[in-house]
Amino acid sequence: QFYTPYTLVELILNDKLPIKDETNHNVKILDPACGSGIFLVESYKRLIRRWKNKNPKKIITFKELNDILVANIFGIEIDPLAIKVTAFSLYLALVEHLNPKKLWIDKTNKFPYLIDNPKDASIKGKEGKNLWCRDTIGEVNPDDFEKVNLVVGNPPFGTKKLSKSIMDYCVKYNFGKEMVLPFLHKSVDFCPDGNIALIFNAKVLTNTEKPFQNFRKWLLNENYVEKVYNLSIFRKIPKNFGGQLFTSAVGPICIAYFQKNPPQKTSDTIEYWAPKTYVKSNLIDGVLIDSTDIKFLPRIECQLPDTKIWKIAMWGNIADFHLISKLSKIHSNVKSFIKERKMSFGVGLQPLNKSTIKPIVDNDISNLKFIRPERISKYFTPDTSFSDINSAIKDKETIAEYLKYYKKNNIFDLPQINVFRRLGKKEVYKGPMLLVKEGFKDNEFCASLVNTSVAYNSTVLGIHSEQLEDLRILSSMLNSKLAAYYLLMISSSWGIERERIKPNEVYTLPLQFSEPDFKDLVSLHEQIEDTININPLIIRDANNEKNIEKIILRSFHLSQRDICLIEDFLCQSIDIFYKKEKSIAFHRVSADENMIYAKMLHQELNDFYSEANHKVNITVYDVQRHDPLNLVVLHFCNTEKSIDVKPTNELSSLLKELDKYSIQEKGKNLYVQK
Ligand SMILES: C[S@@+](CC[C@H](N)C(=O)[O-])C[C@H]1O[C@@H](n2cnc3c(N)ncnc32)[C@H](O)[C@@H]1O
């Protein structure tokens, strides 16, 4: 069983079933995979509260509690035990609202029958209509079910061990084989005129395969999507965080709010909430959604099934989206370069593991040295970093497989291993080659030139060519900040599921340079190799790396603003992801930075208004360490002046007062920083 963290239930119901000043207690609610009923119980409690809002002077009776429950609360669940827990929890919620509590002992008051389970003979003749013990996808015809006003829940997800009914459903609609999709799709039939708010797997938004695109096409074109929360960051939250509230959390999750028919007032944007981190400070202990994490995405773009906007907008803004789109349109990329130059490429070997069906014996690879991914360094790796082929096996399970295969008891008795699960193409182990790691280290992507043949594992992509110059060009590009920016922004997995960049994402990285740039890059790369060769302890050559960066940025004709976006993403957003509240992004802004900001505003606004007769003047307040907020004030007037700087004196207490309103609680352990 997977329980839904209460934070999520509260978040959804605060939006879709608020209590404050609400009096409508006739809202039919369905959870199509209700588990032990957390959404239903919380919804029921809210309807009771709404009844009380409507009847502030009355005491709610058993009958009224009973009627609200039977008329409005519906669940479907495949597990007979879970559905009994749901019924029991709903009864408890009912009893809790009786006043005096002992009223339930009154013999004339009987709990309503709620469960309908044809397979349970013990409830024959006592079936209810509210909680159906069924396979929602295979056994429930929505026509037989009362139409509801609101669907909420956390349906099962995953791509493994799909039941036949789910499989058939996905095949019928040509959707990706992911359990959650049929639940989202079928909800519309249960709720043709109401609202749907369901939790689903974030990969559904970023998976680039056609069947997932088909699903997105349906979701975003045949329905009206109001809002999406991308809470992939929840998967990073440790178990003991946020007062244990995220204990059962969770993979990379999203929540979609949608409905079949558009509302009266439609918007041409979709609200997208994508918090970047969780924070523990003296103010909060939970997920902090900065107001810049709330984006309004153009609906038309979201409706394109192959759009990358969901991923890009997790970290960046619309300007990043335009920059990535511009880069993606560049004709030449890593793949076309590799093909043009007839290079061999492919990922490395996989050692034996439990699921190996046909072990591959190979003595050529066995005789090679091996390089562990963590020994690969940026730009160039000398062969002093190589080790023995047996260092390809490190973790306990792999060692156990090899001991079994060679019938040995001790790792030291193993021969030079010559058997593997997968080998890939043998020519990619031939030097010289470029090795590209799938992972990131210190916010950087890593590719490395290696001169001699060596084996490596499948987390590394190898590219072999006799033309060293071509490999140097690829290395310069792949090691650049621009590459890190582009690859992290478009990767379907990084930041969502596993922090890795897949080879077919690497292939899409654009390449662009002139003949003189080509020569300069090659020469700078050679200088880096020389530095490392002369002294292998020096693993970085900052000067030459900087010059390579410069040429790359120049060759893509990037503007100063584009460069700012790249820097901002790598230094701030990614830093938040890795370092959380310790990130530089949460450091206090200094007086100097405030001034730089004011100057930029001053120039941008006065340029913007240059045609009209407006001028904008700016006052910067010289905030002190103890002031919680910065202050830059804009004045519209007729004559332009230079930037004023004033002391904060009398403003300090106002800033403190304002600060109290800057963090808003959105649900337990979930805050919005305005
Ligand atoms: C993530 S859990 C929901 C948890 C629930 N919100 C809670 O907190 O208890 C998904 C539920 O879907 C149920 N389920 C899985 N496949 C189902 C199906 N085909 N039809 C109905 N329920 C299903 C599982 O038994 C599980 O209880």
Image: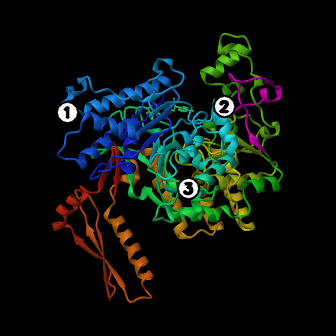
Residue corresponding to mark 3:
223
Residue corresponding to mark 2:
164
Mark 2 or mark 1: name the one nearer the start of the chain: 1
What is the three-letter code of the residue carrying label 1? Asn
Determine whether the residue tagged by mark 2 lies in a helix, strand or loop: helix
Q: Which residues are magenta?
A: 345-370
Q: Is mark 2 within 8 Å of ligand 1?
A: no
Q: CA distance from mark 2 to mark 1?
A: 48 Å
Q: Nearer the viewer, residue 50 or 270?
A: 50
- Image coordinates for residue 332, horizontal then vertical, percent: 74, 61
Q: Nearer the viewer, residue 37 or 235?
A: 37
Q: CA distance from mark 1 to mark 3?
A: 44 Å
Quick one: label 2, few (<14), some, or many (20+) residues within 10 Å?
few
Residue corresponding to mark 1:
99
- Image coordinates for residue 604, horizontal then vertical, percent: 43, 77
Q: Is residue 619 above or below residue 578?
A: below
